[in-house]
Amino acid sequence: MTVLHLKTIEQRLLWLSHWMIHHANHVRPKVDGIKVGGHQASSASMVSILTALYFSALRPEDRVAVKPHASPVFHAMQYLMGNQTRDKLEAFRGFGGAQSYPSRTKDTDDVDFSTGSVGLGVAITSFASIVQDYVQAKNWAADRPLGRMVALVGDAELDEGNVYEALQEGWKNDLRNCWWIIDYNRQSLDGIVREGLFERIEKIFAVFGWNVVRVKYGALQRSAFEEPGGTKLRDWIDACSNQEYAALTFMGGAVWRKRLMNDLGDQGDVSALIDRRNDRELADLMENLGGNCVTTMAETFAAVRDDSPTCFLAYTIKGWGTPIAGHKDNHGGLMTKTQFAQWQEHMGVPAGSEWERLATVKDAPALEAFLRDVSFFAEGRRRFDGAKITVPRVAPPGDRTISSQMAFGKILDEIGKGSSDLAQRIVTMSPDVTGTTSLGAWVNRRKLFARADQADAFIKHKIPSTAKWEFAPEGQHIELGIAEMNLFLLLGAAGLSHSLLGERLIPIGTVYDPFVNRGLDALNYACYQDARFMIFGTPSGVTLAPEGGAHQSIGTPLIGMSQDGLSAFEPAFADELAVIMEWAFEYLQRDGKDDLDERTWLRDETGGSVYLRLSTNPVGQPGTRADDAFRQGTIDGAYWLKTPGPNAEVVIAYQGAVAPEAIQAAGMLGEGRRDIGVLAVTSADRLNAGWLAAQRVRSRGNKRAIAHVEQLFAALPRECRLLTVIDGHPLTLSWLGSVAGHKTIPLGVEHFGQTGTIGDLYAHFGIDSHSIVRAVGELTAGKAI
């Protein structure tokens, strides 16, 4: 009976997913005349796999990343289970409707991992499994069974390099409880995949310690192979090229018969095997590959009983069960209205019943009873809400001269000395730059994570070293190889721990700031999922002078400003950094339930992740500052380091490591200029976001909306000039002149740097104190605007 129910569900999902796409493209009124799309063929190839997985194999603790192009099947499944509404499906790929690709933040149904940027949804499941092991090793109160982290993978997705970076990292971290199910339909967007790819896939996974299960033949095929002549039929299938198999599938049963008889006929038993089946039955047999057989897939999943990472290579037909099955153009293609009408008749769905959940089901009460007992859906929506962690006061180090990077290391180490909840919940990670990003002291104190103890041989042999690389289950640092994509995927997985696993972590990652760009896709992906983490980009800018242009970041401040879900800061002083980190620890835990902050108009109530751009340049510290204006200004994005007088002619606004140059320039200018102001910008991102938000609020009629930056500039004379300076792209601060219409000249770095001293490079790029003074002279003389 279970097999019959699974087959019924499979056919229901096939219909509902394809009707959803057809409705969006051919029934729903078109506004702009552009094809809506929806990937009917890619959905069809996955429908049997998803049915067997969700309705037979999975448990509530399991988590799944669904292949992006199978999104319609996922939404149809949730609709069948009562977790998705008809109006959302009717608006599929429309505003407010079910999303084109599964989204845990924008879809209302139960999405575990967002997918869409191919490869990333696959890889994050391996890192989620590592995070699950990390949480379990800590012996915290929650007693939940270990789940499997499952990815449904398109075979073309395996062209993505980050998949193989993740495989290697999984091997190094003794990966377990991870399934990757490959939809091996052998067709991609532009054509047919290379012959023999399956052999390469199997070898690669085996090298990294995965079990590989090839699922090539369905139940009909395996039964036929037992008939006289069946061995010859199987040999023919194995020898047939991907292109030929796809083309024959598209042409149908009569062509299958002709081709098989030409190749295998007049052999007695094989001819009889073929003749016993009519054209429809013969087509069903030849298209009954393992991945398109729900019975086979259910049996295959049930046979895996250990926690070893497992790759299922499931052979499928792209477009299976539809008139466009096998056609090489079917990836983005759609059934025509005529094709769909014929297919609807074939599927037995009456006109007017297209959206009915159980329209073609003969025994609906029996199926409903089966659905109520499906294990995976038994506990409803599987989202947890880890308890919030109290954040103690974070104090800056007392050094009179210190870089922001070194201050970060000391602050984190000071937290690590204690036993607060915050200290226990921090997990750090870095792509082989732990020591050079100032995480060393924290790691020495809190150890590295591994499921089993691993002693440091250098300690054992009493060899002096500043690093203590002790691995233990209680360790709180996860060391990664040199792969920034993996860093951001692990940050994303750890940053979802409170929701996926019910235990809140405070993930902190470090990376050389220029190499933020190497993991940018994964950073965006983590933010899109609303994962919560802190990322420290350090060292940064041409301040990293001796390392040369390849290691000197230019555009990362603009990335921080433009990336949704990420608040970006660039503190110059240690006390600013301490204030920001204290705020960030709490900001990571916000859930959007508080009211909008009408003081800044930022969406702080929603919370998010935080990016801090730090420097290795030692800076003289300003001494103790504890006033509320300084602390609040640091968080809001800027404060007056030197408040301008009523007749101010010039304001110098700086961000980050160039603070000494800006301060020195102000002193040099103060001898001949009146009331000079110095604006310490700690976050151009938050300043700009608050300004834009306040403008939107005012456009809706609330004239009381005044942004923080507008309040800062409120007393400046109209004729006052602004000069902005940053060790980064000048556009980061150049917009400040638009706030109140002040003439502005922006200084910064626009081109690749080179090796040299900091002084050499600052002078070369015109961001040293003398260049600032000259620029102010030109600005106030009217030579620049």
Image (spheres, rainbow, N blue to C red):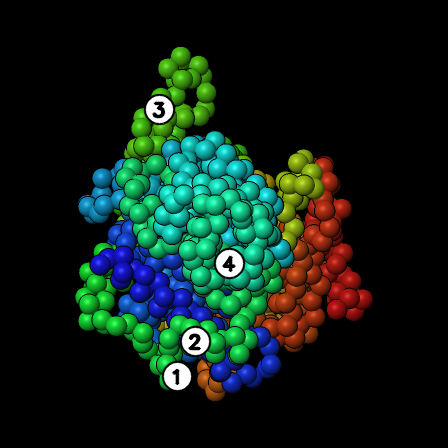
- Which residue is depicted at the point 53% across and 48% down? 265
Query: Callout 3 environment at 10 Å: few (<14), some (14 to 19), or many (20+)?
Result: some
User: Callout 1, which amino acid?
Assistant: Ala
Q: Do the residues labelled 2 and 1 touch (CB within 8 Å)?
A: yes
Query: Callout 2 environment at 10 Å: few (<14), some (14 to 19), or many (20+)?
Result: some
Query: Callout 4 environment at 10 Å: few (<14), some (14 to 19), or many (20+)?
Result: many
Distance of mark 4 from mark 2, alpha carbons?
A: 19 Å
- Which residue is depicted at the point 38% across and 52% down? 220
Assign the C terminus to one quadrant of the image: bottom right
For residue 625, say whether it is visible: no
Distance of mark 2 from mark 1, alpha carbons?
A: 9 Å
Left or right of 458: which side holds 776? right
For residue 325, say whether it is visible: yes
- Which residue is depicted at the point 42% across and 73% down? 346
Residue under circle 4? 318
- Local SS, label 1: loop
Mark closest to the chain's N terminus, 3 or 4: 4
